[in-house]
Image (cartoon, rainbow, N blue to C red):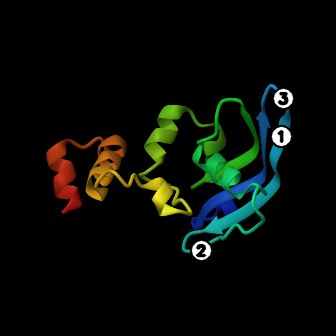
Amino acid sequence: MSQLSQTEGQLLELDRLAVTFYTPRATVRAVRDLSAEIRRGEVLGLVGESGCGKSTAAFAIMGYLPGTTRVDGSILFEGRDIAHMGDSDLRELRGNRIAMVYQDPATSLNPSMRIGTQVQEVLREHLDLDSRQVRERMI
């Protein structure tokens, strides 16, 4: 852990993040040796050619990669190693402390559902609220 991550302002630290996909046909190392530190209030943009691993790195941070994937290095969020968290701990973290905003909203929101319905679903899922509490929260 770097000295910076020990300070109160450290939000996210990636240290030598590597992501490898294993398939019956091939082994693909999609992300190699990615390191970055983000403090509270900072913004980091990942820029690169199509297929260079930007989305894969984001999916690794969120814990959204399939079980056939190997994640090496560390992903510390608020000092907690989320690269090796269990599903229940990740579920509690996602939507409450960390979230992913997709590049194309048309692909992340279901165009056949009202936006309010989709927001309600997220609140029920991540905050364990009943219907009345969800309505109050949305208003």
The correct choice, above or below, for 96 with respect to 46 in the image is above
The correct choice, above or below, for 104 with respect to 119 in the image is below
Calculate the distance from the C-alpha at mark 1 to the C-alpha at mark 2.
Answer: 31 Å
Q: In the picture, residue 6 is in which quadrant?
A: bottom right
Q: Residues within 10 Å of mark 3 (few under 14, many from 20)?
A: few
Q: Which mark is residue 42?
A: 2
Query: Going 71% across and 30% down the picture, which residue do you hit?
Result: 68
Query: Going 47% across and 33% down the picture, which residue do you hit?
Result: 88
Calculate the distance from the C-alpha at mark 3 to the C-alpha at mark 1.
Answer: 10 Å
Q: Which mark is residue 28?
A: 1
Q: In the picture, residue 73 is in which quadrant?
A: top right
Residue 100 or residue 11, whichever sits in front: 100
Dot 2 lies on which element?
A: loop
Calculate the distance from the C-alpha at mark 3 to the C-alpha at mark 2.
Answer: 40 Å
The correct choice, above or below, for 96 with respect to 64 in the image is below
Mark 3–mark 2 contact, CB under 8 Å? no
Of the two numbered discs 3 and 2 on the same chain, state the one appearing first in sequence: 3
Q: Three-letter amino acid code at disc 2?
A: Glu
Dot 3 lies on which element?
A: loop
Q: Which mark is residue 25?
A: 3
Residue 3 or residue 21, whichever sits in front: 21
